[in-house]
Amino acid sequence: MRPIIVVAHGHLASALLATAEMIVGPAPSARAVDFEVGSSIEDLQNRVAAAVEEFSGAGRALLFVDLAGGSPSRIAAKLALDGDSDVVAGANLPMLIHALTAGEGEDSVEDVLAAGTDGVCQYGVSKRVAGGLQ
């Protein structure tokens, strides 16, 4: 499994990772970085960089962020430009679980995005998914 770092506003990063671990078990190659009220952008940047550095040499890191354009995503995007990582915005539990359980070669950004999209649906009389009814 490639290193996974979840970065989000409030306590969402910790909650997402803890929930995923409740379902799939411990994830030793994953870290959560919360952007808490009162934290500075500089502090967040340092903590995200430290999390990425912790896994240097362990493969291309995958950073999940909660909101495209937010402080966590801007920091993650800058680190991705400077280093060896990918960033996915709009993180959700299905995509995180996929990334945590993916085998070698099944953890591409495209695979993770597909898992996240497939995990979003509407239930009613019938299940609606992107592209029609299922």
Image (cartoon, rainbow, N blue to C red):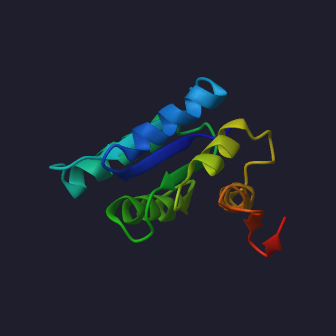
* Left or right: residue 122 compared with residue 48: right
Q: Is residue 88 above or below residue 5?
A: below
Residue 14 in the image: x percent, y percent? Answer: 41, 38
* Left or right: residue 92 compared with residue 127: left
Can residue 20 be spotted in the picture? Answer: yes
Q: Is residue 132 above or below residue 38?
A: below
Q: Is residue 27 above or below residue 125?
A: above
* Left or right: residue 60 compared with residue 127: left
* Left or right: residue 59 compared with residue 31: right
Work out which quarter of the rendered image holds the C terminus and state it: bottom right
Q: Splitting the image into 4 quarters, where does residue 75 fall?
A: bottom left
Which residue lies at the image location 56% right of the left edge and 54% below the top edge? 85
Residue 61 in the image: x percent, y percent? Answer: 57, 47
Work out which quarter of the rendered image holds the N terminus and state it: top right
Can residue 29 be spotted in the picture? Answer: no
Which residue lies at the image location 74% right of the left edge and 67% below the top edge? 128
Q: Nearer the viewer, residue 11 or 64?
A: 11
Which residue lies at the image location 80% right of the left edge and 41% below the top edge? 104
Q: Nearer the viewer, residue 51 or 98?
A: 98
In this view, the residue farthest toward the front is 125
Residue 133 in the image: x percent, y percent? Answer: 82, 70
Q: Splitting the image into 4 quarters, where does residue 119 fall?
A: bottom right
Which residue lies at the image location 65% right of the left edge and 57% below the top edge? 116
Q: Nearer the viewer, residue 91 or 49?
A: 91
